[in-house]
Image (cartoon, grey):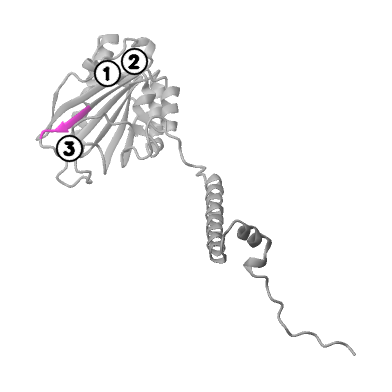
Amino acid sequence: MTPAKSTRTKRRPSPDETWGSVRLAEMGLTGFQQKILAVLATVVGILVMAFVLVFVVEAFDEDPVAEPLSSSPLGQAKPSDYRAWPSLKQFAPIADRAADAKPLTVEEVFDTKTLKAGKITLKLGERQLDAACGITVWGEALTEALETAGCTQAVRGLFASSDGRYVAQYTLLNLESATAADELVKRLSSLYRGGWVLPLQSAQPALTGFTEASGHAMGHYAGLVWIGRADGAGAEDTDDMVTLSLAVREAEKVVYRRVVAVTGVPAN
């Protein structure tokens, strides 16, 4: 006769009967203390696994399209809108820097401290000349574009209206040729989304929020206009941004004087 199978459930060994428990017991730990130690070990194991998982995810989750910035942290201010203007024939005498080799000075570019834009009065604040153009902008692509254009000088001037409503910055770039200037202002139509001119540090209101910009090639120079309301809001019907932009371009008189110096004939 075949012996009947036992219906008794096989009893699991208690913590006190396992090898680890025996060792812990030999160390003087009670059963309750052993259970607490087991719980702590489980928690530590979970935390270690979570840390490893986060590390692996971050290692493979790099943004392949994120643009490294050349001279500023991510989030620098940039214009909300940009328009490009090619060089006019009047600037042909200074189409090459070889014909106009004298370096710019900050005094000749920003020699006027007060500008009029209709009923608006603009006051010149900070002004600065940098021989290293790359440090005046952010965005790797723009930095490389300036190097390709043979930029040797960047002159910036910051303006604010006397009523505190508007802020503007004008930048004049000394480039290798009119071809380089035309190409740069044209390329900025896309480059400005990932790089722009750094604003000068000032106690005046900053260029933030909605701002407008334009690039103007003038022989081997490129002028960048950047304007906006001090509160960062978009322009309203009462805001004459065109007149404001024209007033800031007063700094371009230096380029016209350079044409006269080369030809003796004013650039009309």
Q: Is residue 265 left or right of residue 191?
A: left
Q: Please provide percent x and percent y for residue 60.
A: 56, 46
Q: Is residue 158 left or right of residue 16?
A: left
| Residue ID for mark 1 | 255
Compared with residue 157, is residue 15 higher up or lower down, i.e. above or below?
A: below
Q: Is residue 226 left or right of residue 180?
A: left
**What is the span of residues highlighted in magenta in the rendered image?**
158-162
Q: Quadrant of the N terminus?
A: bottom right
Q: Classify mark 2: helix, strand or loop.
A: helix
Compared with residue 166, is residue 95 higher up or lower down, i.e. above or below?
A: above
**Mark 2 near mark 1, Cβ–Cβ under 8 Å?**
yes
Dot 3 alpha-carbon crowd within 10 angstroms: few under 14, some 14 to 19, many 20 or more: many
| Residue ID for mark 3 | 166
Q: Please provide percent x and percent y for residue 38.
A: 57, 61
- Ranked by sequence position, the earlier of labels 1 and 3 is 3
Q: Please provide percent x and percent y for residue 267.
A: 25, 18
- Ranked by sequence position, the earlier of labels 2 and 1 is 2
For the point 19% across and 32% down, the residue is 203
Residue type pointed to by label 3? Tyr
Alpha carbon separation for disc pair 2 and 1? 9 Å
Residue 94: assigned label: 2
Query: Which corner quadrant of the image does residue 120 belong to?
Result: top left
The total of numbered circles placed on residues is: 3
Q: Classify mark 1: helix, strand or loop.
A: helix
